[in-house]
Amino acid sequence: MTDLHRLSIRELSEGLAGSKFSSRELTEHYLKRIEKIDAQVQSYVTVTPEQALAQADAADALRKSGMANVLTGVPVAHKDIFCTQGIKTTAGSKILDNFISPYDATVVAKGKVAGLVTLGKVNMDEFAMGSTSESSYFGATKNPWALDHVPGGSSGGSAAAVAADLAPFATGTDTGGSIRQPASFCGLTGLKPTYGRVSRFGMIAYASSLDQGGPMARSAEDCAYLMNVMAGNDERDSTSVNVDADDYVANLNSTSVKGLRIGIPKQYFNVAGLDADVKSRVEESLKKLEDMGATLVEIDLNMTDAYVPTYYLIAPAEASSNLQRFDGVRYGYRCENPVDLTDLYKRSRSEGFGPEVQRRILIGTYALSAGYYDAYYVKAQKVRRLIQQDFLKAFESVDVIAAPSAPTTAYKIGASLDPVEMYLGDIYTIAVNLAGLPAINAPVGFDKDQLPVGLQLIGNYWSESQLLSVVHQYQQATDWHTKRAAIAEETV
C-alpha cells in the first residue's frame, strides 16, 4: 500500500487488528519514506531500521497470539532528548554525540510496553534551547511546508517528521512552548500537559521546573492515543504527580463546545509584533467555535509584560545547574590533551556546547551568583507565583483561555533575529510553563505565504481531556488538520 502514511492512528490500529497490513509492512513503508524524503527535511538524527523491524515482527507475533494492545505495531519517533537504551541520545549537542544510553526513559519504556515501534530519534535545538531547531549540532531541520523556513523549536524534528509523514506521531518536550510553537509552524496538533502529568525520568533536563513531555500528531484524536501511553505517575520521577490519568481517547467527546466559556485576553491580541494574518486566522477560529456554541469572554491577564523576563531568568538558572554534569569527566565529549583539570572543564564545555547553550548557562550562572541570587532568581520566582495567580483568577470566570501559539508564522532559516527578538517570540507560550498549566495547539489556517497558523487553548490544571475534546470537536467541523505539505504527498 502506498498511502499508509495518510491513515490516522485509529485507522492504523484498526488496519493492524484487521490484518489489512502487518506492522512490518507499515514500518518498512515509513523507513522507505524516511530514506527517500528525509534528506530534504533533516528531521532524524538517528534512524534505527534493524531495531524497528525487530519490534515490528514482535508486534505482529503479539497480534497473532491475541495479546496485542490497541497501538501494538504502530510506529513512533522520539525526540532525541528521551534516553533510549542502546541508541545514541544526543539532545542535539556535540557534547553528547557519543552517548549511548544504558536505559530507557519512562516515556520510551511505556511506548515499548504499548507495542510502539521506534523508527528513530528526531532532531531538536541543542538541549531544547531554541525556537527554530537551528541550534542543533546536527544541522537545521527544515519546515516541510517551505524548506527554506524553520519548523520551530525545540521539538522541530518531531514536528517536521510528522508534517512530512515520516512518522504517524512523535514525542516532544515543552519547556517554554517547544511542543506548541513547532506544532503551530508545521500545521499540527501538539499538547503540553500539566506539569507532572508525564514522567521526566530519562528526559535530559533543561529547566527542571518547566520541562514537560507531550504528544505531537496531526489531530487531537491522534494525540490522545499517544497521551494514553505517555501519561501517568512514575515513582522514579520526584516531580511526577500521583493523579490518575484519564483515558484520553474515550474522553474525546467529554466536553461540549456548546456553552464553553473561552477567555480572550485583551493584552494578547495587542502585542507588538503580532502578525496580521496570524491574528485574523485565530479570530476566525474563535468565531467558528462561537458558531459551534462557545461563548467568548474578554478577560485581563495583567502580568503579560512579566512573562519574558521572568522565564529568561528562571529557565537559564535551572539550565546552568542541570548542565554542570557535562564536564568531560564521566561521559560525553572530552577535549583532547587537557593540561590540567581546569583546562579539561573549560575546553570540553567550550568545544562541546554551542553558542545558545553557552549564552543561557552564563545568564543563569550570573542570576544564581552571590549578590544577585535574591535580586534576580528569587524575585523571578515570586513573580512566577503572581503569573500563576493571574491565570487562576481568570479560570474563575472561563473554562479555557485562547491565544495565538506564536505571534508569527515560521521564520526563514538563517533569519537575522537576535537572541532577544527570538525570546520575545515565546510571549504566548512561556507563561503556561511558568504556571505549570496544560495547553494545546490546533492548526487553524494559513498566512498569505501558505505557512500554517496555530490557535492555542490553555486549560486549568489536569484538563488535558477537556483541551483534546474541544480541539477534536473543532476538527470534526473543519479540515485544517488534514492539510498536507507537498513533500508529504510524495510516494515511495
Image (cartoon, rainbow, N blue to C red):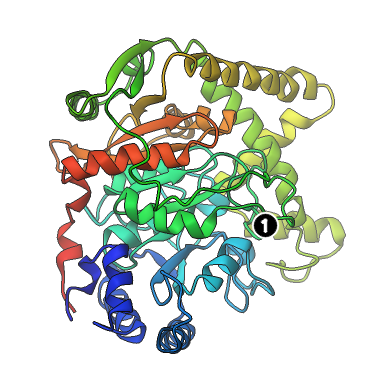
Relative depth, front residue between 368 and 111: 111
Residue at image coords 55%, 41%: 175
Q: For residue 320, say whether it is visible.
A: yes
Q: Residue at x 64, y 75 (%)?
A: 100
Q: Between residues 40 and 223, which one lies in front from this camera angle?
A: 223
Q: Position of residue 308 (x, y in %)?
A: 52, 24
> Neighbour class for label 1 at 10 Å: few (<14), some, many (≥20)?
many
In the displayed structure, 37 sits above or below 450; it is below
Relative depth, front residue between 41 and 224: 224
Q: Amino acid at mark 1?
A: Phe
Quarter placement of the C terminus = bottom left
Q: Is residue 140 left or right of residue 339?
A: left
Find disc 1 in the rendering and name its residue.
201
**Residue pictured at 71% horizontal, 60% vertical:** 348
Residue 328 lies in what quarter of the image? bottom right
Q: Residue at x 67, y 57 (%)?
A: 201
Front residue of 354 and 236: 236
Find residue 329 and report its horizontal and vertical position in percent.
Answer: 80, 65
Q: Please state the horizontal and vertical placement of residue 67, each as a whole percent of the image.
A: 48, 81
Q: Is residue 160 above or below residue 180?
A: below
Quadrant in the picture for the N terminus: bottom left
Place residue 327 in its image quadrant: bottom right
> Is residue 411 something one can see in this rendering?
no
Count of all numbered marks drawn on residues in the image:
1
Residue 119 left/right relative to 20: right
Disc 1 secondary structure class: loop
Residue 398 image position (x, y, % from top left): 41, 18
Q: Is residue 312 left or right of residue 277?
A: right
Using the image, determine if residue 417 lies above or below residue 331.
above
